[in-house]
Image: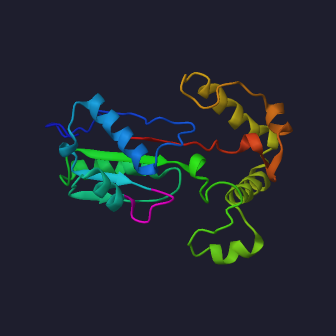
Amino acid sequence: MSFYNGRVAIVGVAESDYGRVPNMTEMQLHAQALWRALDESGLRKNDIDAVFCSSHSLGMPTVMLCEYLQVFPRYTDTTSIGGSSFEAHLNHAVAAIRAGKCEVALITYASNQLSSRGRMIGTGARPAPIPEATFEAPFGNTLVGAYAMAARRHMYQYGTTSEQLAEIAVVTRRHAGLNPLAMYREPITVQDVLNSRMIADPLHLLDCCVVSDGGGA
């Protein structure tokens, strides 16, 4: 939300229920996160005049979300660059507010991949409708396999070791232990990571991202 001096502030942040939430759709998770964020901010739904959203499962996420929520923005953004999409959305929202295109921006994401067992989990047997799938799908590449290739290249180029990669999982779990709502809070060690089963060389099970249901706004 913009102020008279031109500054921009985050006035509400909230999460939906998360972990395993089998009784809620992706849209319901979006809505729950939104209502909680509005409660924290003191704003009303009708104050929202910009919506920023990305989705792995919705073809036109802002259009579908706005229809579901009955929000009628004058500015939308569906920039999709993977897990960092929402960092980009934050920057884009600030720019849009400063440019006078909107005053109150909603940035939201939700997924029920864990309960729905969508294509982002497991083998990714149904390749995404993207150009590179033409070259990757015949060789059985998976989502984790794509990250494994990036990790292997990093090892080749910079001398990174599996032990160093494992430290990422260890530190991430340590931070999760500080959050009472985290899905997994038990500490792990580098050896735990290396002893977990190999998913796509060089990535072990505990190297991989935790899959959960949930959303935030």
Viewer-nearest residue: 106 or 8: 106
* Region in magenta: 55-61
Instruction: Tell me: 156 left or right of 112.
Output: right
Quarter placement of the C terminus: top left
Extreme-right residue of the structure: 195
Extreme-bottom residue of the structure: 134
Q: Is residue 10 visible?
A: no
Q: Residue 12 in the image: state x and y as whole percent.
A: 31, 33
Viewer-nearest residue: 104 or 217: 217
Q: Residue 131 in the image: state x and y as whole percent.
A: 58, 76
Q: Residue 187 in the image: state x and y as whole percent.
A: 71, 24
Quarter placement of the N terminus: top left
> For residue 74, what is the image quadrant?
bottom left
The residue at 83%/48% (across/down) is: 198
Instruction: Tell me: 83 left or right of 124.
Output: left
The residue at 41%/59% (across/down) is: 79
The rendered magenta stretch, by its main secondary structure, is classed as: loop
Viewer-nearest residue: 33 or 199: 33
